[in-house]
Image (cartoon, rainbow, N blue to C red):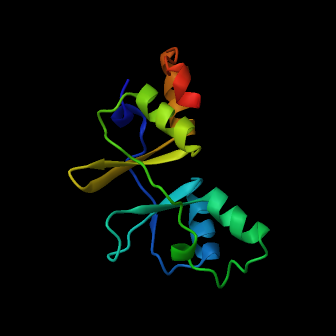
Amino acid sequence: MQVKDGMSSVVLSVGPTHTLREAAKQMAARRVGAAVVMNPEDEGPSIITERDVLDSIGAGEDPDSEQVCDHLTSDVVYAAPDWSLEQAAAQMVRGKFRHLIVMEGGDVVGVLSVRDVVRCWTDDGAACDVPADAAA
């Protein structure tokens, strides 16, 4: 099974100057744990996750004044639609994150979450053959 089979092709995006509260409201309304951030000044799309929002609030920062651009996940990894789910899962384990932006030809075509991977493996009855060194 490939990333394209499990990814969400409808992607929530927020702007870099949205507040964390605005981003959190949109993520909550869509029931997703991440939003893609398009900033013309950056080389590629970034991602803001529920963990980024929680880290900020946990640090005592005001979600009504903090901007998305100041809390983006660093070291974004992009997946390709033709990656295997095992390859995507291994990248998530290595990077210690739960979402991958799926890119094709320079365009965002989806987002893959850990939940998507589990859903596919559960629906498919497939076993995961992630190499043992992927967890390192």
Residue 90, placed above or below residue 70:
above
Tell me what residue is drawn at x 52 percent, y 14 percent. Answer: 127
Residue 66, placed above or below residue 124:
below
Tell me what residue is drawn at x 62 percent, y 74 percent. Answer: 20
Q: Is residue 118 left or right of residue 58?
A: left
Q: Position of residue 53 (x, y in %)?
A: 66, 65
Tell me how many marks there are. Answer: 0
Q: Position of residue 44 (x, y in %)?
A: 33, 63
Q: Position of residue 4 (x, y in %)?
A: 34, 36
Q: Quadrant of the C terminus?
A: top right
Q: Quadrant of the N terminus?
A: top left
Q: Position of residue 100 (x, y in %)?
A: 45, 47
Residue 96 occupies which quadrant of the picture?
top right
Q: Is residue 90 left or right of residue 33?
A: left
Tell me what residue is drawn at x 34 percent, y 77 percent. Answer: 41
Residue 21 occupies which quadrant of the picture?
bottom right
Residue 60, placed above or below residue 106:
below
Residue 101, placed above or below residue 59:
above
Closer to the camera in the image, 78 or 28 = 78
Tell me what residue is drawn at x 65 percent, y 57 percent. Answer: 51
